[in-house]
Amino acid sequence: MKPLKLEMQAFSTYLERTVVDFERLNQAGLYLISGDTGAGKTTLFDAICFALYGEASGSNRSSDVFRSEYAPNDIPTIVELTFMVGGHDYFVHREMAYYSSGKPKPSNDYLMVEDKLTKGKKEVTHAIKELLGVDATQFKQIVMLAQGEFSRLLYASSNDRVKIFRNIFHTKNLQELEDKLKNKDRELEGAVSKKKTELDTLLVSLSFNTQEAYNSESLTLIKEHLDKMLDDVNKQDVQRQKQTAEYKEKQDHYFSLKQDNERIDQLEKLKKEQAELLEHQQDIISKSTTISHINKALEILPMEKECQSLSDNVEKLSVEEKMLKATKAQLNEYEKQYQTRLIKQDELKKQSEQLHDTHIQAKRAMSMLEALKESQDAILLHTKSIKQLEEDYQVLEEDIAQKEKRIARDNKSVAELPDFIVALHQNEEQVNQYNDRKNKIHELADLFDHYNNKVENYYEAHQLYLKTLTSYSELEAYLNKQYALRMQANYGVIAASLKEGEPCPVCGAIHHPHLAKRVDDVLSDEKLAALEKKVTSSKRDVDLKFDEANEKKNAILLTKQEIKRLKDELKIAEELDKDVFIRLLSDITQKKDEAGKSYQESYTHIEYLKKLSSSVAMSQKVLDSSKAKLLAMEKKILSLKSAIEVAKTSIATIKQQYPDIESYSKEHLITLEADYAQIQQDIKAITTMGEKLKRDQAIYETKQQANSINLKAAKEKYDIKKQAFDQSLNERFDSYENYQISKNQQDLLEKMKQEVDDYHMHLKTIQKQLEDNEKLVKGKKKVDLSALEQELHEQELSNKEMDERYYALKNSYESANNIYKKMIKIEKDNARLLKDYQLYHNLMIATTGKNNANKISFERFVLASYFENIISFANIELSMLTSGRYEFKRRQEAKGNGGQGLDLEILDYESGTYRDVKSLSGGESFKASLALALGLSTMIQNYTGGIELNTLFIDEGFGTLDDESLSQAIDVLMKLRETDKVIGIISHVGELKNRIESGIIVRKGERGSQLTVTA
């Protein structure tokens, strides 16, 4: 991401619209932002961060303070940023507008690239995050190192670095894989445990069960008992069906007699209802007559409406006939006016022809006059150009001679480049050998520390395992006790319902000398399930702690073997301790520094010669261009002299053809054109008037003829329809008034018809029911059924008792059989789940790092590899900034088991010890932070498919450096100008102003800040 242009209005200290052209600064590569304290230097970084993410560049400032204190409510706060990513230009607009009351308006933020537009504050921020690959916090840690927060990336925790690098190197899919495998492992583990609990619970719920827990023989024993229960059920069912058939026969006879009694009662009721309906018959006849009159009125109603419509049309056509007569009078008057103006038309045509000839002659003379003046002006202009070209030709000729001498001198120096390159390769090979041995010594020292830490960790893990095992054993014993109490309670419930002489549903015995006692002090299902879950969780903890202790023990053995291998490779025979490592590192560092110094001297001179070679090639191109330009100037001078001669010849020819040409003027020509145009306009107006008269007369004749025909036809049609309506009215009604009465009652028609239809339907239904009931009860009388009802009641009670015994036994069998079927299905499902659980559990262990000594997950392992590359790039800069004293190291182990892999520490070559980065002084911390930021930026640039963040902003921090450190920091930043990176710095340090030419100077004003860009 590179900023190209920044525009601000009413933003913080900038009231007026202020534009910063970053394209000029980007070409310089390194630029300085300077100015008075409080003038608005940091505000430029705030504006960039606000444009991208809608917030400030530092965590100690909020976006609420961005509104300029000088701005009135009618001026909105606007920040616009044009920036480049991936070769494409993007434009983002952020706006904070206000009503006259001071209340903020809805945001008007948008992001635009080519034809695509994204609108909305949150939508724009999300699009920027997707485009750059980092959020606001990560952007400020990587790109925009704010005042007071420069060391945040240096001091970031391992977990914070994971969040930063995850977006940069696109490892989110690895984290998602870990989470999915963890969730699947927990899901399958819970499912397996649940199935086992379900089997145990179902087994205990069987009334005839004698086992404490489910095992491989449980299903066979249950099946045998179920077969015996099914035989008892079938025997009782035969006896029950026989008794039920006898009861059904008596019941059918009872219901037949009862139905006859009810029909006799219904017959009396229907006779009474029929009599009531016949009393209202006269009212129904009256309503039928009214319905007939309304229907007749509705038959002729359309004829009446049609007559009214025809009458309205006749009236309309009569009015239009009167209007046409008035139009005819107006046309006659207009025709008289046209005849008067037609007489003047011939005279106007003659005047037009004379003016046309005069105008053509004057126009031809004016054209020649303009050509004469153009030739005179060309002579003056060409003469002046020839003089300037001759002066420029002499200056360019002298410049070419100087460049030829300088190129010859530089080519002699460039010829020494191959010898220096050979010497550089020899020095580089020697430095690499020293670095390799030094790295291996560091690796051995790390392994030695890790070995001691692992021994201590193994002892702690083993003690934790023993403690967890004791806790699990106590919980398991308590759970088994609760299972036994639950089984005893179930037996007590069954025993409470047993009766002497009746078979036991569990064992089949009919004598019960020793009934099980009822137990009340039993855990509820919810508490028992919670206890089972707790025991299962405790068992997992025991297995986990055992695996962890065993892994630590194996890690100790592997580390010990690796230490022996490295000692043999480095040929170290003595016993290892801290003093040995300090001595070894000190010796190899001294040798490496001497070789590195020689390498740096050769490298610096080679870089100078390479730049000189590029400069010579560029100068040669410039020289060739200058020579070509010199030749072009010669040709241009000759061309101009030739053009002067042509212009002189043209002037002489024009004066010979028109001796009095200078007497013509443009004003005379304009007058002739105006007179001619006026006459043409008058002629056209007369012609247009005649055309309009003919058109209006034709329209009148057409309308008058059509209206006369239509009026006659309308009157005839109305008379016919009116006569037909009157005839139909007289046929149906005595008078027009009776017709109106019936017509006005049409809204009641449907209601009256429904009432008449309902009456006839009801009467017909009752008559039909009377006929049916009289046939059914003919020759029958009511019978007393009380004795038969008592007999049926007693038989019903006997059947109910038998059904209860039968269904109790059947339900017991079906319940047990359903449980048996469920257990078979659960057993099959559990076998499949267990297989899947073992597969996913192994994958989860591998990706989460539980199978390696440092407990580093797969994602952290990948990010640690990227971090090593970042550290390598950062160490190049840190070595230059600290004269080789400090070197970054990725800490291989961290305290505890979580969040490892991306911790950072410092190797101090002066003391030969590792230090925490937080132990660095203020100046050292600044140099380390700068080196780490540059290393990360270089890694991002080199990473294929990585995000594009090739800009770095630094706000203060240089004031903490001494003179030597400041010089080293400036040299590092100057070197970065050779890459594609752009760095902007805010600082008051004078040395920076002297060495960095390009920049932005910010000044305070009475009503806001102003700035100047120098490049």
Image (cartoon, rainbow, N blue to C red):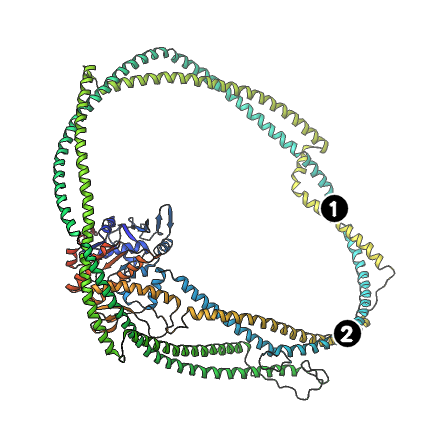
Instruction: Read off the residue under disc 1.
Output: 283
Residue drawn 37% across and 52% down? 120
Query: What's the distance in space between the residues labelled 2 and 1, CA to CA?
Result: 67 Å
- Residue 136 occupies which quadrant of the picture? bottom left
Measured from the top left, where is residue 82 in percent x and y? 30, 49
Checking the image for residue 371, the label placed there is none
* 944 in relation to 329, above or below: below
Q: Position of residue 43 (x, y in %)?
A: 24, 56
**Is label 2 in contact with label 1 (beta carbons under 8 Å)?**
no
Mark 2 belongs to which amino acid?
A: Val
- Residue topped by disc 2: 238
Q: Nearer the viewer, residue 946 or 303?
A: 946
Q: Is residue 410 above or below residue 652?
A: below
Q: Residue 335 in the image: state x and y as whole percent.
A: 44, 14
How many C-alpha atoms fall within 10 Å of the one at disc 2: few (<14), some, or many (≥20)? few
- Out of 240 and 22, give the one closest to the viewer: 22
Mark 1 crowd level (few <14, some 14–19, many ≥20, 10 Å Cα): few
Report which quarter residue 382 is drawn in: top left
Whether residue 647 is visible = yes
Residue lying at the far bottom in this picture: please name it.
Answer: 513
Say above or below: 639 vs 887: above
Compared across the picture, whether 829 is left or right of 80 comes to right
Label 2 secondary element = helix
Of residues 212 and 112, the one drawn nearer to the viewer in this rendering: 212
Q: Give, as a three-letter code, the residue at label 1.
A: Asp
Would you say residue 150 is visible in this rendering?
A: no
Outermost residue toward the right? Answer: 779
